[in-house]
Image: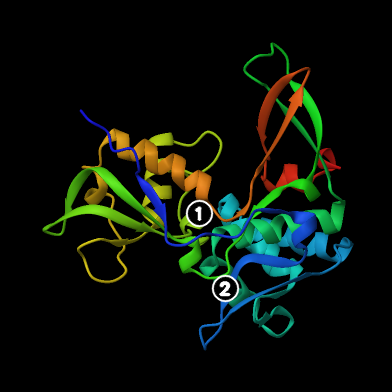
Amino acid sequence: MEEKQQAATPESEAKEPQTVQQRGAVLPLGITDATGNLHRDLAVRRWRMKEERELGELRDKHKDANLATYVAMVLATMCTRLGPHDFSKMKFEERCLILSQMFMGDVFYAYVWLRINCLGNVFPIEFQPGWSNKPLKIKADLWSVVVKSAETFDEACWRYELNDPIEIRGTEVKAFKMAPQRWASMEQHDAVGAGANQGLAKLIIIKSSIHECEGIDGQIILTDDELDEMSKLDLERLTTLCDEKVLGPQMAVEGEHKGRPFRAPIDWGYDNFFGISSV
């Protein structure tokens, strides 16, 4: 079978990546106001015993909430401003709804920004590289985390040409318009993260990133069944490209140890990210 060499093309060129330190308190893409303008403001509260107690009570009250949902609760509590929204004047439920509708990269960025502001930029990581028979311990600098951003929504979109076209709602679809995921797609499933069903995790990532199908008018939300006919080749390519093109902070650190390169994921689980072991 002959493969197509060019499977993905950008809608337009996104901005050059920056580090968190270079970008500062500015969301990677932002939140749209009623007039369609993007706002990127970001501000957080001091994390004191009062906030610690408040977050502990929230956790006890929502024991069944998954990690993504609790992250939204933490940010709804600790952020004072996100985009055009003044959180000090809004109810908690309204703040959580706004976070659910935000782009995933913006939520992760606010999460990293909060961690740096309350516990500092040094973040210990322990991981097992494939070339070592024992865990490697490093101290990552969160200021140096690479951030991908875009000036407009269209800048953040890209086109994926399917190697194996599929039929969707009676139309042969040869390409997708891909767009940044919303945080709600993370909240709705427990399948994204460590120990997850990887097949289901790939489906969630791809499905929540498909914005339009060429040949079908308008924005579209596909069902799991509609993507069942996607080939393994397109599945793996799209999974890789979604990871490469995702906006926001790169939730991993790269470096070299004794002449060997490594890439270690940042564990953003709440207990690890904001716990004593992360100081």
Q: Residue furthest left?
A: 170
Picture coordinates of residue 245 (x, y %)? 51, 50
Amino acid, disc 2:
Ile
**Disc 2 packing (10 Å; few <14; some 14–19; many ≥20):** some
Residue 95 found in image quarter: bottom right
Q: Earlier in the sequence, mark 2 or mark 1?
A: 2
Toward which corner of the image does residue 108 lie, by quadrant?
A: bottom right
In the picture provided, is 24 more to the left or to the right than 252?
Answer: right
Mark 1 residue type: Met
Colour pattern: rainbow
49 sits to left or right of 238? right
Q: Is residue 62 shown to the viewer in this render?
A: no
Q: Position of residue 164 (x, y in %)?
A: 22, 41
- For mark 2, what is the residue? 98
Q: Is residue 245 left or right of residue 251?
A: left
Q: Which mark is residue 186?
A: 1
User: How far apart, in angstroms, are the residues tagged by discs 2 and 1?
Assistant: 14 Å
Instruction: Kindly give the residue lying farthest to the bottom in the view shown.
Output: 35
**Mark 1: secondary structure:** helix
* Residue at 54% in and 66% down: 100
Locate the N terminus and report the quarter of the image it occupies: top left
Residue in front for this viewpoint, 192 or 243: 243
Dot 1, how many residues are within 10 Å of its Cα: few (below 14), some (14-19), or many (20+)? many
Question: In the visual, does 121 lie left or right of 41?
Answer: right
- Helix, strand, or loop for circle 2? helix
**Residue 80: percent from the left, percent from the top?**
75, 75
